[in-house]
Amino acid sequence: MFIRLNLSILISIFLAINTLHVVNCQSPDSILYLINHGQIKDDLKKFNLLCRLASNSVDYDTIIKYSDQAISLAEKLNINPSQAYVYKGFGCLNSGKLAAALECFMKAAKYYEADKNRIGLAATYTYITEAYVQQENFNNAKYYLKNAVAIFREEEDTIKLASALHNLGYTNYSMGQYDTALVLFTETGKIYQKMGNLTEYAFCLGNSGLVYSRQSQYQKAEEYLLRAIEILNNQGDERAVTQFMIEYAAILQHKGKINDGIATAKSGFYKAKKNNYLEFQRDGAYRLSKLYQISARYDSAFFYQTLYLNANDSIKSFKNIQKMADLRTEFEVARKQSEVEVLEKNKLIQLIVIIGLGLILLLALGIILLYYYSLKRSKRMTAVLDERRILLEKQSLELKEQREVLRQQKEEIISSINYAKYIQSSILPQEEQLESLLGEHFVLYKPKDIVSGDFYWISNIENKTVLAAADCTGHGVPGAFMSMLGMALLNEIVNKEYITHPGVILRHLRKEVIHSLQQKGERGEQKDGMDIALCTLDPENMKLQFAGANNPLYLIRKANLPEVGLLRCESGGDDRLYEIKGDLMPIGINDKMANFTFHEIDIFKGDTFYLFSDGFPDQFDSRNIKKFGYRKFREQLLKNNSKSIAESKIILEKVLSEWMGENSQIDDIMVIGFRIR
């Protein structure tokens, strides 16, 4: 994490290079009025006014809008659009559209190079550096920044050289070269303080604080960061204040001040959200997830971890990285091609002169000249081939570096999902609670991915045990989100409202899911939700109540006991398997929205109940041809009934493994069984 030049400073440097011919003292509103009412007849003046509107705007979408209009007008007038491309690049850069920003800056650099405007070219190199820095591609950033520093030195431009050197300090810091970065920040800070430039001086203080933080000198880091935040607050620079506050929260975390750290990080996160600073939203969410994890507030940790993942995916998408790499290659190749074309043009003029002289000389001299030309052409082709070989080697190295970046990103994502699994596992009922409320039982729980869309839930209210097994829409991260919502809503309905009636619980759950997902029942709307089997066990009165949404309840009992529901399977002995069906409607918006059917049955010692999702019956065999099926599933449960509940689980796992073979799991799998004591 490191501070970058804000938009106003970049534009001030740029305005020093490009003078706009506009009427003095015109406000942006008056300029906009003149353009919108067709009072500007001169297209060149209109172009300059559009550029001025872009430079004076603070809204990034507005900057992009006026810059695009100026670019279109420049193409019509056949004039240099470089300054419009730079303004558009600023807008894209500060709104997180890094690939688009880089494309604009590359185009501007081409125009400056063609016009031999070295100061403009060097300034644009610093903007290209900023795009690569935000993408954390520090090698490319350093390459362009060194080119900018070299030009500013040759042109003896002290102010811009100081700015470029400061940015070089950022890059060294980001690459872990802390001592070099600290020297550069200290030196440039003295220069800016002497110049009276408080904003840039504050950046140097803040960045020195970041360096001390990385060196674990937290007291010094806190001192420098607080001084920087105070100055930048007075200067009204919200972007810089936002970033430094998030970094200050990390220092408070290291010092053990967790609550202060959470308050500071929250302030920074919501400033970033208010101003649409995407990368700081990512950094703030990451810091809050870590602070909440330390304070054992796992729901909040999971929430901010999810926000971090979403923001990180937006910034570090593969397409952005690939496009930015392609843009740099395109720019470098175009520049080399331009040099080759100039060389070819000069050679052509030389050739014409040689041919003209050859007409006067003897035929022998003409043959000698022809041989000389052929030899030279052969050498030139060899040189071009060498150039292309070097370019290909360079591109190959860059591709290897990009593959390494992608590998690291994948590891970060897997690490985040594993942490999400830890949070989900901590919210699911623990074995001690299940043993206390159910007695002899087992839970066969096998997520398809790291996290699961299936979940089970249990609670005891007024000596009654409420048990649920649910299958949410989807699996993996989307299914896990829905499972978290389901568990949270069941806690509200059962534990806070003291409702134990299964049909009423499912009716309340359906209402809250529809409300939470803002489902309207409109045509084409995604019908997310869950299938669930829910029962309430009353051991004192030996009763069990049940209601289901698309999912049934299986009961295995002796043949001499009363029949319940639909007889589905008989063994060779005296055991029978009965199915108590759930209603054919889900928890969520549906064409049918009736009340859920309530079932109440008498229970006897030795009765065995099973709740499950469709994952086990739907699993394909090793040849990926045939599903396990519900009939085979019921037969296996009935066959296992003579065993203990613990042995039944082991047998089910073994049967499933043999059935799947080397085939992959296609869905989350969950089976819960318990026996009445």
Image: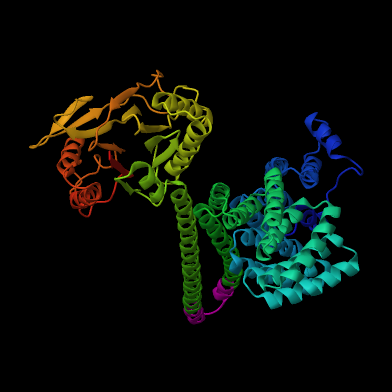
Please, is residue 266 above or below residue 615 in the view?
Answer: below
Q: Nearer the viewer, residue 595 or 624?
A: 595
Asked if the stretch drawn in magenta spans residue 416, the answer is no
Residue 504 as seen in the image, left or right of residue 54 = left
Residue 368 magenta: yes
The quarter of the picture where residue 557 lies is: top left
Q: Residue furthest right?
A: 25
What residue appears at the point 53 percent right and 49 percent down from the top-left corner? Answer: 302
Residue furthest left as drawn? 572
Does residue 550 show up? no
Range covered by the magenta-colored residues: 354-372
- x and y, in percent, of residue 146 in the image: 68, 72
Q: Tell me where residue 475 appears, x and y as whole percent.
A: 39, 43
Q: Which residue is drawn at 19% across and 37% down?
A: 634
**In the image, what residue occupies the spot 52% across and 80% down?**
362
Quarter-of-image position of residue 470: top left
Q: Is residue 232 left or right of residue 341?
A: right
Q: Is the magenta stretch mostly helix, strand or loop?
A: helix
Closer to the camera, 516 or 51?
516
Question: Is 411 above or below relative to 189?
Answer: above
Residue at the (83%, 51%) spot, across then down? 236
Quadrant placement of the N terminus? bottom right
| Visual colour scheme | rainbow
Which quarter of the rendering shows the C terminus? top left
Q: Is residue 335 visible?
A: yes
